[in-house]
Amino acid sequence: MKNIVHRLALVVVPSTLLSLVYVIAGCASNNTSDAGHFVTKVKPVLEYYCIECHNSKSGLNYGGLNIETGKAAMTTGRHAPVIRAGSPDDSLLFVVLRLGHEEVLGMPPAPDKISDEQLAAVRDWIRAGAPWPEGPEGHLKLPR
């Protein structure tokens, strides 16, 4: 009987520990690698601070950058790509947002600077590979 319990423990304990590791890893993740982080945290920032100037209609006047969709954001602009997935410090989008309006190259140009929390959301999103969903979830809308 003791032998059976010992063998059972060798099978059950490792699988239980493995399950626990998966649960802990899932809880520790901040979900920046999924499209949900983009939709809830990053998209509102880009729509509030960026899309008014960087769209298909006015983008040519503002560095040629269009951020209406992920594909456009990755392929347009004088310094394309402005987003380097996995590397926020090499991504022009993050760099100019971090500078703020006080600097010549800083964005947004308006006095209402992006908050530290918003900037962190953009940084974390880029660091996680900048996943940008296709379809309506990933399409930025111009303010009305």
Image: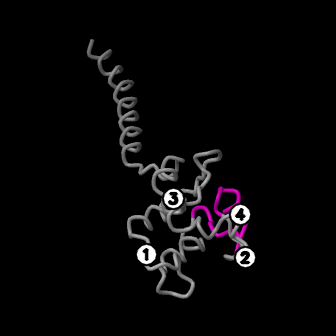
**Spatial CA span between label 2 and label 3:** 23 Å
Count of marks placed on residues: 4
Earlier-in-chain disc, 1 versus 4: 4
Q: Residue 47 versus residue 122: which sits nearer the camera?
A: 47
Instruction: Name the quarter where the C terminus is drawn.
Output: bottom right
94 drawn magenta? no
Q: Which mark is residue 125?
A: 3
**Spatial CA span between label 1 and label 4:** 24 Å
- Name which residue type carries label 2: Arg
**Spatial CA span between label 3 and label 4:** 23 Å
| Element at label 1 | loop
Earlier-in-chain disc, 3 versus 4: 4
Q: Is residue 94 left or right of residue 20?
A: right
> Magenta segment range?
67-86
- Name which residue type carries label 1: Lys
Q: State if disc 1 and disc 3 touch (CB < 8 Å).
A: no
Decide: few, some or many residues near mark 4? Use Cα within 10 Å; few <14, some 14-19, many ≥20.
some
User: Residue 57 in the image: x percent, y percent?
Assistant: 71, 65
- Name which residue type carries label 4: Ser
Q: Which mark is residue 78?
A: 2
Disc 4 target residue: 56
Location of residue 81 (image quadrant): bottom right
| Element at label 3 | helix
Q: State if disc 4 and disc 1 touch (CB < 8 Å).
A: no
**Of labels 2 and 1, the one closer to you:** 1
Location of residue 25 (image quadrant): top left
User: Residue 52 in the image: x percent, y percent?
Assistant: 59, 67
Q: Residue 90 versus residue 65: which sits nearer the camera?
A: 65
Q: State if disc 1 and disc 2 touch (CB < 8 Å).
A: no
